Amino acid sequence: MKLSGAQIFFECLKAEGVDTIFGFPGGAVIDLYDEMGKHEIRHILVRHEQGAIHMADGYARATGRVGVCLVTSGPGATNTVTGVATACMDSIPVVIFTGQVPTHLIGNDAFQEVDIIGITRPCTKHNYLVKDVADLARIIREAFYLASSGRPGPVLVDLPKDVVSSKTEFKYPRKVVLRGYKPTYEAHMGQIKRAYDEIASAKRPVIYAGGGVIHSNAAKELHQFGETMRCPVTTTLMGLGGFPAPHELWLGMLGMHGTFRANMAVAHSDLLIAIGARFDDRVTGKIAEFAPEAKIIHVDIDPTSISKNVLVDIPIVGDCKDALKKLLHLAEEHPTKNLETARKPWLDQIEKWRQTYPLAYEQGPDVIRPQFVVEKIYEFSKSKAIITTEVGQNQMWTAQYYHFAEPRTLLTSGGLGTMGYGFPAAIGAQAAFPDRLVIDIAGDGSIQMCIQELIVAVENNFPVKIAILNNQYLGMVRQWQQHFYDRRYSQTCLSAAPDFVKLAEAYGAVGLRAMKPSEVEPVIREAFATPRPVIMDFVVNPEECVYPMVPAGAPMTEMLLV
Amino acid sequence: MSTSNQKNEDLRHTLGVLVENQPGVLSRVAGLFSGRGFNIESLTVAETIDPEISRITLVTSGNEQIMEQIIKQLRKLVNVIKVIDFREVEFVDREMALIKVKAEATTRAEALRIVDIFRGKVVDVSPTSYTIEVTGDGKKIEAITELLQHLGIIEIVRTGKAAIARSKKT
């Protein structure tokens, strides 16, 4: 029997196990929307396509499954680009379906036509223009496979209107055949042995883990390996939750706003074991002075990440989980003797660093410190909440003061640094886990970038909580202006702001405000007890800075501490 | 530990890239080079014996680390089937040029002599010009161009490089 492209589309989604899509209709996808009602799939209607892609991304990060969004041609497609690039930088498996004008009009500057394949070529893992309905099922199959295998990433499929409405025999391909795509999962045993010998004999080793540990579901193995080898662990922003934060071997996050002890440990280490991380400039600072005494082992599934920024002594291409399992196996077979004693001087030194400059702030009686808000949110939500953030100070304070113990509990735009990401991502996570507490820790600047999605939370009864650390500034840029531009606060003052409590109420959500430190706890308690979307407006110290702070391009040991 | 911004010499290298013969693939390859700041000095592309596969020969430059990145990044493209690094194998390469040169009564004979020496061919003749076809490596093309210069070159069209490994087939 012949099926239409639209029918095939939904049959394919069903075969891929998709239960939810985030989207927004339009002329070029009207046939898909017409068909939708006949299938058992939940469609979350967003209010802006950027919301749809961030929701699909949040859904993917929270669940580990592929997130799906559907938008129309032209502006519908271009509105997703920021979110596509966000997912690409952080290796998130999403499939984006965009409508396209009918094939005979492509290239004619037709109404709502844009070359979205050309536009997204550099910010997708791969993309497809479907020119013939006979290719549709195969391409959708390939798109899901590409998005979720190897180093995950976004795959965009462009669907011309006539392709969706024409008919063909439907057969869902079981196998994917891609001649040029064969990711390496198995870590090479010879390299693993070399790595293990180095780790066993190192005096000052540090494990530096990244988002790859989360993507490959290797948090348990990382935890075990760190403990077995008595090796201190730091992670990137993307790796938070990959190692349980309250732990004697935990160093905190490293990098520009990393802890003193994490950056000092890396700077003095003799062996740096990078697992699923990519030596981003926010982690290395001045690259010539990064880990100057260390040999480097680097495990990554993407060969291009290895020796891209920093030359590596022992490269291991493969899945983090596979590599860690093999290392653990070696550790079992050939246990290293006297590790406890051997590591003691190093761990003692790290403890000294911890005591010298712990993360600290003082909460007085009058003005709310944003760090205090994050610590209180942690206190009342730990181990059960999914936290999302926007980008800037709110994100860094969350990374520093919320102690993530489980993978997939922090959803944040690390690589691209997309303001406006956190709130739609929280909706995506809530759509996947209706019973979990999902909190977006936001700034008063970034929350306004996708605030229109509040109605989506209300409409769908997603009880997402938004905690605005409201300092009436674009705080992170203001902080740079304070330190490096003589306090010339050019265009960073947001004192003209909406009343967020009234805004919440206008959308049918709940608005709460805390002006004084004593009000923080009651507001959080009330918000968490309210089974509806809530905005908490915390009016915080306007000129608070994130410390430690390493100026861009400086060595990581040159930290501004207060 | 050594770093990426060591300045060793940027050398010219030839790569062979087998790709799926589909629309947009060339733009993925070209976009990779421009997006990541790599150089393309020349690029030639044509179908292979297998009509589903095209072969791109490209000449690029960079130090050891840049070359490693270029090759890895090319291999990462889903439509790239194979990358041949001609630094690792002996190879033969050729370019072709079409040169339109002034040829008047007094200079026609000299033009023909030069064409002969370089084993070129005259492929088009007019009362005032010859169009010459010549193949060889880059140096040979530059050499004939230099010799023809004083006769008056009207136009030159050069192809990129095509390269193939010696003896065993790549």
Image (cartoon, coloured by chain):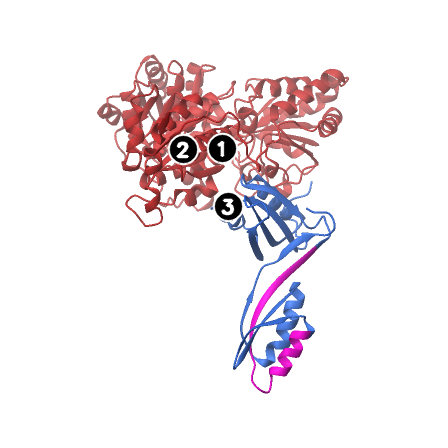
Chain colours: A red, B blue
Residue at the (29%, 20%) spot, across then down:
A460
Which residue bears the numbered disc 3? Answer: B25
Which residue bears the numbered disc 2? Answer: A96
Mark 1 or mark 2: which is in front? 2
Residue at the (40%, 19%) spot, across then down:
A432
Instruction: Confirm whether circles 2 and 3 share one chain.
Output: no
Residue at the (33%, 32%) spot, across then down:
A450
On residue A153, which mark appears? 1
Mark 1 or mark 3: which is in front? 3
Q: Amino acid at mark 1?
A: Gly
Question: Which chain's residue wears label 1?
Answer: A
SS under mark 3: helix
Q: Amino acid at mark 2?
A: Ile
- How many C-alpha atoms fall within 10 Å of the one at disc 2: few (<14), some, or many (≥20)? many
Magenta segment boundaries in residue numbering: B92-116
Q: Quadrant of the N terminus of chain A?
A: top left
- Of label 1 and label 2, which has the lower sequence position? 2
Is A379 contained in the magenta span? no
Q: Quadrant of residue A413?
A: top left
